[in-house]
């Protein structure tokens, strides 16, 4: 059993405190947007979870590059953990976006470029897990997963810039404000504080979860090695 590092314990506490503070800032410090009302507060968590999803997919791509260069198992474990965590956060972002869209656009879903590309990204990385489950050889599974994660990441920036490349009803909040009917709004100082603190809080939360997932992956690897050694002795 791996001893839990003190730094990880501190990161657990820090991430929990930051997420709680972010929630307090969103609900009690940031003002209610005049046109959209309370539903606008979903925006802070919607963007933060989407950001964490994209961050994790980037980490998986970097881990894929490092695995192909070194062939060290730790990078395969890190890449898998990053994808698993990011899939959950990205799905939460899509669900929160639908909750926001219902009163603003009068629909839960529309095939807007941002929404469509986000759904495609989610499916691409779900396929990553299917790829891993279909390969029994550990070395081949790690190599194929690394290559897939690298090329899969090209879909992530496309999702981010889609609302700037084509006409879309999805608002561009950072840098400009669209018509109120599209959900656009200018952030005042308290809104910006809540927004950027939420991004930081969820980023720290992601790092905390990834560290735990890597530790779990290493333990799983040791268990698999012991099983293999036991099988070798019996045969």
Image: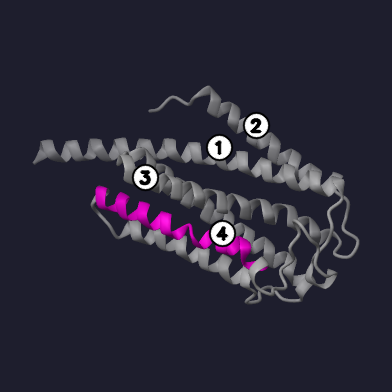
Between the C-alphas of marks 4 and 2, the distance is 29 Å
Residue found farthest to the left: 235
- Circle 4 Cα neighbour tier, 10 Å, few/some/many (<14 / 14–19 / ≥20): few
- Marks 1/3: CA–CA distance: 18 Å
- Seen at 17% across and 36% down, the residue is 230
Look at the image and say whether residue 227 sits in the magenta stretch: no
Find out whether the residues at labels 3 and 4 contact each other: C-beta distance under 8 Å.
no
Q: Which residue is mark 3?
A: 76
Q: Which residues are magenta?
A: 139-163
How many other residues sit within 10 Å of disc 3, few (<14), some (14-19) or many (≥20)?
Answer: many
User: Which of the two labelled residues, at mark 1 and mark 4, occupies the earlier sequence position?
Assistant: 4
User: Considering only order in the chain, which callout, 4 or 3, is on the residue closer to the N terminus?
Assistant: 3
* Location of residue 203 by image quarter: top right
Give the Cα distance between marks 1 and 4. Answer: 24 Å
How far apart are labels 1 and 2 at the CA level?
9 Å
| Residue 144, magenta (yes or no) | yes
| Chain-order first, disc 1 or disc 3 | 3
Assign a secondary structure to mark 4.
helix
Q: Position of residue 26 (x, y in %)?
A: 79, 48
Query: Residue 207 in the image: x percent, y percent?
Result: 55, 39
Instruction: Say whether marks 1 and 2 touch (CB < 8 Å).
Output: yes
Residue 157 numbered tag: 4
Q: CA distance from mark 3 to mark 4?
A: 22 Å
Q: Which residue is mark 1?
A: 208
Report whether 22 appears left or right of 114: right
From the viewer's side, name the closer residue of 1 and 215: 215
Q: Earlier in the sequence, mark 4 or mark 2?
A: 2
């Amino acid at each position: 059993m791996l001893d839990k590092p003190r730094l990880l314990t501190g990161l657990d506490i820090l991430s929990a405190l930051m997420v709680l503070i972010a929630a307090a800032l969103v609900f009690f410090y940031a003002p209610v947007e005049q046109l959209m009302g309370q539903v606008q507060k979903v925006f802070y968590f919607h963007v933060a979870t989407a950001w964490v999803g994209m961050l994790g997919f980037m980490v998986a791509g970097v881990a894929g590059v490092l695995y192909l260069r070194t062939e060290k198992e730790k990078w395969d474990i890190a890449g898998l953990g990053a994808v698993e965590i990011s899939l959950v956060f990205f799905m939460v972002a899509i669900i929160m976006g639908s909750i926001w869209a219902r009163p603003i656009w009068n629909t839960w879903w529309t095939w807007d470029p941002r929404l469509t590309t986000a759904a495609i990204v989610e499916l691409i990385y779900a396929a990553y897990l299917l790829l891993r489950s279909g390969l029994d050889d550990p070395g081949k599974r790690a190599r194929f997963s690394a290559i897939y994660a690298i090329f899969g990441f090209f879909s992530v920036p496309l999702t981010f810039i889609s609302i700037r490349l084509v006409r879309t009803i999805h608002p561009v909040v950072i840098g400009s404000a669209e018509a109120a009917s599209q959900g656009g709004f200018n952030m005042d100082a308290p809104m910006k504080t809540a927004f950027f603190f939420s991004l930081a809080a969820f980023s720290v939360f992601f790092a905390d979860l990834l560290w735990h997932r890597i530790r779990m992956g290493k333990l799983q690897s040791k268990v698999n090695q012991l099983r293999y050694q036991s099988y070798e002795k019996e045969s």
